[in-house]
Image (cartoon, rainbow, N blue to C red):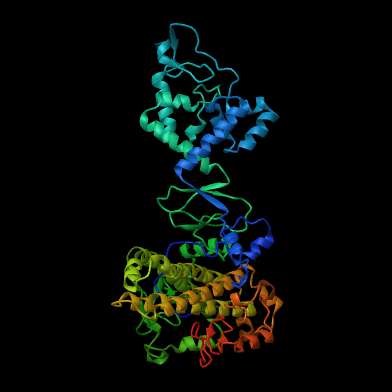
Amino acid sequence: MDSDEDMHDAGSIDDDFYSGETAMDSDDDADAAYEFIDHDSDDSEDFLAFRNQPNYKILSEADIKQHQEDSITKISNVLSISRVAAGILLRHYNWSVSKVNDEWFADEEKVRKAVGLLEEPMPLPDGRELTCGICFENYPRDNMAAAACGHPFCVTCWQGYISSAVNDGPGCLMLRCPDPSCCAAVGQDMINELATADEKEKYNRYFLRSFIEDNRKTKWCPAPGCDYAVDFIVGCESYDVSCRCSYSFCWNCTEEAHRPVDCSTVAKWVMKNSAESENMNWILANSKPCPKCKRPIEKNQGCMHITCTPPCKFEFCWLCLGAWSEHGERTGGFYACNRYEAAKQEGVYDDTEKRREMAKNSLERYTHYYERWATNQSSRQKAIADLQQMQTVHLEKLSDKQCQPESQLKFIIEAWLQIVECRRVLKWTYAYGYYLAEQEHAKRQFFEYLQGEAESGLERLHQCAEKELQLYLNAEGPSKEFNEFRTKLAGLTSVTRNYFENLVRALENGLSDVNSHPACSRASSSKSLGGGSSKGKNNRGKGSASKSSSSRNLDDSGHWSCEYCTFANVKAATVCQMCQQRR
């Protein structure tokens, strides 16, 4: 679990293998998304099709405009009002058509007053010249304009008023009449009539974005530069979303996809990575304050004679923090301090040393998990570029050399996608491990075992996809062993997926298997890993001896089935050729 020596930098786009992107109708269906699949069953294809049903829709800008226009049309037709008024109503009620209908038919007058819609628009006052209510200048009637309330203002003042509102931000969508005593709404028709081209473009952009930002069922993809939005089915079990831009994120907290770790753990972990608390821990663990000026000093080599930096320049002993003028050969010389040793035996430094030791241990523990989290993160990022190269360059090259169509080489892409997704899951398991209570020894032991088995499986898959594939890319012509490589890589992909599905399910269930099977050993636990295709859902989690013995028996063809990955090995083999586990 802790070894990073074999960690490879590889991966792919952010397709979500464990996102559970399924419009689930019940909790049973949610659990079923992580059940093992019996590949011998006639229902496995139907199950996979169900599991891959998305519980969200990706919306482009054209889609958003269409949805917006449809909503405006519905309200305009049902309530028999103008499209401008329908847009104002929908903006006020966060683009909820049902909310608008409910409120309107419950109390139309109240709604009109709240949003600033008048039943009958008022014309401009009569007269050849009118006085502007802002600049108080007289203008011909043709140079005056008014909202539905009829309060006259000159075109120049209207343009300045609208320009200021639009440049201030999305608040311009709720613009009201400039008259302080009036609350009549200023519609999009006046904006189009009086605003400049740039201001109209800004206003329309705010109007479009309001459909996403004011609607609780829609959000923008948080990836930099992405203009796609997501329409989510609220109430679904899974929050993982994969955008068309290849970025995967959590709908609930908008951080990158982090299943199986919950949002609260992710928030704590991200905060800890950016907070100053670890800096203070480092200072406490690796430095001591100057006895005179109290500035922290780090000692990384040399003797115990410390001189503080200017302007302090105080000289003291690193061990006991006493003035160096009181030290010499009689106190132990430059590399020891008798005073410190005597005081330590009397317990004088116990609290300080204990606090420093605790800070050091805390820092080392955090560093352990953070380094592995960050390593998997960087590996996955680099892998995205590697897979893109595989898809655009290497796949075509391999197709030519092995004389096989690219459609028959998709197993390589699937393997890389699995590698990348496993790197993501593995990364977040280190955040999970950091916050797993130290006193829960059984859960920690079970977690580390599952994590270690999953990581080992991933390394075997990665080694095969990266190193062994290179042999066939560099080959001069078709290789007879390529079909064996295909079988091996596809098998390792399936085995690794099973390992990580078990890990994901166990963490999402809070490692509850430890409570229900407190005496489970490493041997019995291993029977629940990687063997998804050899047993149905009803037998999941049963570590019985009958399964172990049956998996070791030879079949009619003289092969034995590995109890870890179910690979059929030849009779003479003592080690599984797929997962390297002993017979």
Drawn side of residue 164 relative to residue 19, left or right = left
Q: Give the residue at the far left of this rendering.
A: 476
Whether 79 is drawn above or below 128: the answer is below
Task: Pinpoint residue 570: horizontal percent, then vertical percent.
Answer: 52, 89
Report the number of numbered marks.
0
Picture quarter containing residue 321? bottom left
State the residue in front, 106 or 459: 459
**Rendered view: 17 above or below 326:** above
Left or right relative to 397: residue 549: right
Q: Visible in this render: residue 226?
A: yes
The residue sitting at 60% across, 75% down in the picture is 532
Residue 507 higher or lower than 125, as above or below = below
The quadrant in which residue 536 appears is: bottom right
**Residue 444 placement, left or right of 6:** right
Relative to 457, say whether 107 is above or below.
above
As drawn, is 441 to the left or to the right of 273?
A: right
Q: Residue at x 57, y 60 (%)?
A: 49
Q: Quadrant of the C terminus?
A: bottom right
Q: Position of residue 505 (x, y in %)?
A: 61, 69
Residue 407: percent from left, percent from top: 42, 65
> Residue 182, how many percent across, how many down?
55, 22
Residue 29 vs residue 458, the one in the foreground:
29
Do we see residue 363 in this rendering? no
Front-most of residues 350 and 340: 350
